[in-house]
Amino acid sequence: MFVLLFRTALVYGLIIFAMRLMGKRQLGELQPSELVSTILISNLASISIEAQEVPLLASLLPVFFIVCAEILLSVIGLRYPRTARVLSGSPVAVIRDGTIDQDALRQLRFSMSDLMEALRNKDVFDPSQVSYALVEANGSLSVCLKDSFQPACKQDVNVPSQGMGRPLIPFIMDGTVLPHNLDWCGKSMDWLNSLLKQENCQLSDVQLLLGNELPDYQLITKEKAEKP
């Protein structure tokens, strides 16, 4: 039992490390090669845990071979875009000026139901409102609405900006300071320490602190568990 738990914990840590090496795209929508790599890694990892008669190193070597191959393909794709298009495909336009390209849908094996569902996920219910829509290489739909259906912004109606500054971003999360965010907003550790002293709380007591380059901020402290 101890050997099984040890192998599981070791494989778990190594697979997390391998996925970090492969990049953040592995955590979002996957390209075909990335999806294949992820499936193979999960299967090989399960073998590493279950087949205790197989040496751990021998069972994990294929995992890191796949990781290296995926990284190599990514580098090749950056240097040679044509190779990337062969491996991952290219975006395909399915709507132009409100007209659905049915040949493109057949090429992608997209049904009309699939297209309408993807449009609804973009809060679009009428294809005629779409100026241009692409099915990306990862299968997601990108939509550009016609000018008359674009959401209005302040510039469109000549409303002056109120100087709200940057969006509120985290300065502290779960008691951990995010120094890059402080620097971006022109804040310093001295400012942060002064703020905590003003609020009469310790860094470890802060659940979330949001702010920007303006003086305003939002502070949420951790709730103490009630004693039974």
Image: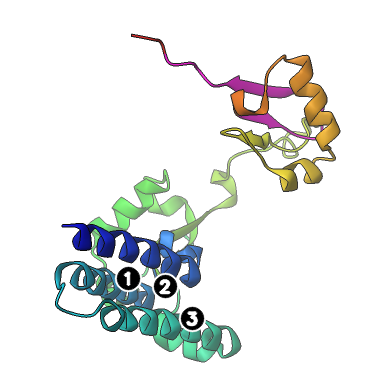
User: Is 102 included in the stretch rendered in magenta?
Assistant: no
Q: Of residues 68 and 56, which is closer to you in this image?
A: 56
Q: Give the percent coordinates (x, y) of residue 117.
A: 30, 51
Residue identifier under label 2: 137
Q: Earlier in the sequence, mark 3 or mark 2?
A: 3
Please determine whether, in this image, residue 149 is positioned above or below residue 191. below
Q: Is residue 168 left or right of residue 97?
A: right
Mark 1 neighbour density, 10 Å: few (under 14) some (14–19) many (20 or more):
some
Q: Which residues are magenta?
A: 208-225
Q: Is residue 139 visible?
A: no
Going by the numbered disc 2, the residue's amino acid type is: Ala
Pair 1/2: label in front: 1
Residue at the disc numbered 1: 38
- Cα–Cα gap, marks 1 and 2: 17 Å
**Element at badge 1?**
helix
Q: Is residue 160 left or right of residue 17?
A: right
Q: Quadrant of residue 106?
A: bottom left
**Given this view, does label 3 or label 2 mark the residue nearer the observer?**
3
216 in relation to 155, above or below: above
59 relative to 222, above or below? below
Question: Gap in Å between the C-alphas at discs 3 and 1?
Answer: 13 Å
Q: Which mark is residue 71?
A: 3
